[in-house]
Image: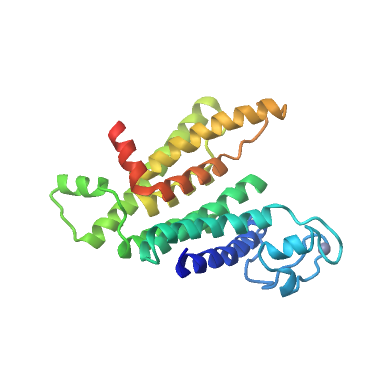
Amino acid sequence: MTLESLVAFLAGLVLGSFLNVCIYRLPRDLSVMSPARSFCPACEHQIAWYDNIPVGSYLILRARCRHCGARIPLRYPIVELLTAVLFFAIVSALGPTAVAVKLCILVALLVGLTFSDLEERILPDEFTLGGTALGIVLAWFIPVDDMIAQSLLLLGGIQPGPHWTSVAESVVGAGLPAGSLWLGGILFEKIRHKEGLGLGDVKMMAMVGAFLGLRATLLTLILGSVAGSVIGLIYIKLAKKDAGSYELPFGTFLGFAGIFVALAGGRVIRWYAGLL
Ligand SMILES: [Zn+2]
């Protein structure tokens, strides 16, 4: 274990703690900046710094608010630990590089979306649209590992420099899959008169595409859909939910699939490209 991976782990704990604030506040349209200090949702008591230490405070307080005794959801330590472990794995594999930082940003956004969807069935625009814009900007500095836009541009006789090529991969990755999903959703609604894929899922896929390019986004979509249908059906059966009215947190499955693809990276993409 290197010092860098340890720092990444600690950074993940702290960022995971901030993600928890976002997961609670964004779906409720509350500001993540004010109040700056966290409060107990049950008794609205401000939480002291020593009760706000990632994972540690949850254990010491035995999952209860110090003031009113309300339960602290298990989601808090899970999000903190998960973000920390993912940051640790990325920096251990790639070193303290710009690529590692970019992947850490993406998985943090995906963790935030995964748990917002699981809890509130909401994929906040702050994550999805903000993440899409950020992914396109970051593409200028850190190359998007794909060659779809490059091939399309070459067909048109255009050969931009490496920075613009990377931005083009990012824009194609964000636009093509999300655009098709959006169009498919409209058609589905016209034909079946009910909503298929939510707009939040579409925007989430645009974000993944802006960071990882077209092929990785298609792979995320396939993995997320398969996992969502299989696990969703099993859950509906086991928990005896009504299949007609139960709303599957599809964004949660897309989130985990996106994290898997981001972590496994080029290796999985090449295996998958070999199948096509
Ligand atoms: Zn309380």
Which residue lies at the image location 40% right of the left edge and 47% below the top edge?
A: 264
Q: Quadrant of ligand 1?
A: bottom right
Quadrant where the C terminus is found in the figure: top left
Residue 157 shown left or right of residue 248 in the figure: left
Rendered location of residue 128, percent (x, y): 50, 53
Question: Image quarter for residue 19?
Answer: bottom right
Residue 84 shown left or right of residue 272 in the figure: right
Quick one: 90 or 180, which is closer to the camera? 90
Which residue lies at the image location 61% right of the left edge and 50% below the top edge?
A: 115
Question: How many numbered tags mark residues here?
Answer: 0
Residue 3 shown left or right of residue 215 in the figure: right
Residue at the outermost front position: 1
Q: Is residue 66 visible?
A: yes
Rendered location of residue 271, percent (x, y): 32, 38
Residue at the outermost right position: 68
Colouring: rainbow
Quick one: 190 or 224, which is closer to the camera? 224
Residue at the outermost left position: 157
Rendered location of residue 3, percent (x, y): 47, 70
Above or below, comparing residue 273 to residue 55 in the picture = above
Question: Image quarter for residue 2?
Answer: bottom left
Q: Is residue 276 visible?
A: no
Which residue lies at the image location 76% right of the left edge and 57% below the top edge?
A: 72
Rendered location of residue 207, percent (x, y): 44, 52
Which residue lies at the image location 44% right of the left edge and 34% below the top edge?
A: 184
